Amino acid sequence: MSSTHIQIFDTTLRDGEQVPGCKLNKAQKIVIAEQLDLLGVDIIEAGFPVSSPGDFASVQAVSKIVKNATVCGLSRSVENDIKVAAEALQYAKIPRIHTGIGTSDSHIKFKFNSNRDAIIERAVAAVRYAKSFVEDVEFYAEDAGRTENEYLARVCEAVIKAGATVLNIPDTTGYCLPQEYGAKIKYLKDNVKGIEKANLSCHCHNDLGLATANSIEGVINGASQIECTINGIGERAGNTALEEVVMIMKQHPALQLDTNINTSMLYGISQLVSDNMGIYTQPNKAIVGANAFAHSSGIHQDGVIKNRETYEIIDPKEVGVTESAIVLTARSGRAALAYRAKNVGYELTKLQLDVVYSDFLKFADVKKEINDSDLHEIIESSTIYQELR
Ligand code: KIV
Ligand code: ZN
């Protein structure tokens, strides 16, 4: 059986940029968009054009420079938003308007003071209007995670009839359990008339730390697009992390799901986004964190030195990290010390290693991590090393 292609919809420049205090200027958005295009994402959501003149200019500039990906602009189900998004996207090779409205009872009642039928009418009108500008129209049912499935299916059916090409099913509040989100996608696949004319898209937030798991359940159950951001940045606890979903699909060929992503660019683009946004990436972040390929306990180090695969499921080079790191701490063993000593030019005999190791432990108990220059100092000042040289 052949694999199913999963489209990667990157929203680093829109949902990702909603992180408080992390606004990107036009020049920064252009640099990141160029890299996303080279990375191989299928769609770049460049911004929310009506939100500010600056964002309009950024979406327009990104539209001009992107060579391969579809460029998308966000709007509410409001005519002026849609018209302004269409204007901002006019230079895009492949433009997409992303429009939508809240569909959960809570959004219908408290945000719109409306009712279910009136919301469907607004959704349909928005899609029809967007369709008058571009062929590719994605509809988002905001808070779909907490929207009753039967009503959500009615919304989907109506917007497909109006011409929507993609149905975005956001778990806006990050509330769903993976099984529940997967079942929602399956329900829509099985119950929406005309579903074969549109693609289903997962857009999951990370409020309970489930964004990645939910997106994967979504594609297992029939969605064909994942909306995500580099480093998982975004509103509150963030969005699904692009690098995580891509590597999950790559490392699990049995899923038979693939993407166009050039994974060797993942680490570089993670650093680029982190530097431009001024958001530090947590060291234990999966795939791109500083410790993702660092080994510090003696048992693990011994295993990795003998064979990398004992404690690593990904070859770091596959994601653009040059090599695994053997970090020297007071928890390290002789194998790690000998390995790192060799890397800096010392081939220690067994006897030298025993003595240097005990000097090393005294040093490491005081200093948390031993770097190369500490290592030189420890070895050079060890009497046994001088004697047996
Ligand atoms: O989380 C969400 O519901 C969104 C929509 C605007 C797509 O970001
Ligand atoms: Zn979102």
Image: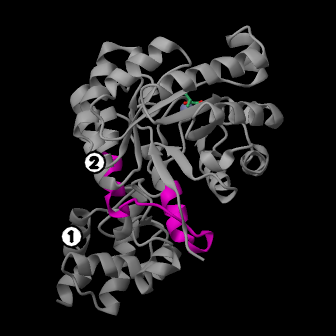
**What residue is pinned by disc 1?**
376
Report the amino acid beneath label 2.
Gln
The CA distance from mark 1 to mark 2 is 40 Å
Residue 364, above or below 386: above
Q: Quadrant of residue 147?
A: top right
Residue 39, above or below 169: below
Report the amino acid beneath label 1.
His
SS for dot 2: helix
Quarter of the image where the N terminus is located: bottom right
**What residue is pinned by disc 2?**
35
Picture coordinates of residue 361 (x, y %)? 40, 69
Could you tell me if residue 339 is visible in this image? yes
Main structural element of the magenta stretch: helix, strand or loop? helix
**Colour setting:** one colour
Left-right relation of 208 to 53: right
Residue located at (48% from left, 67% from top):
331
Comparing marks 1 and 2, which lies closer to the viewer? 2
Most foreground residue, 387 or 201? 201
Residue located at (27% from left, 87% from top):
348
Picture coordinates of residue 338 (x, y %)? 33, 81
Picture coordinates of residue 4 (x, y %)? 56, 64
Quarter of the image where the C terminus is located: bottom left
Residue located at (64% from left, 36% from top):
160
Bounds of the magenta segment? 244-271
The reply to whether the magenta stretch includes residue 248 is yes
Instruction: Sort mark 2 into few (<14), some (14-19) or many (20+) by Cα contacts within 10 Å.
Output: some
Most foreground residue, 288 or 102? 102
- Please tell me which of labels 1 and 2 falls first in the chain: 2
Residue located at (44% from left, 85% from top):
307
Picture coordinates of residue 11 (x, y %)? 44, 38
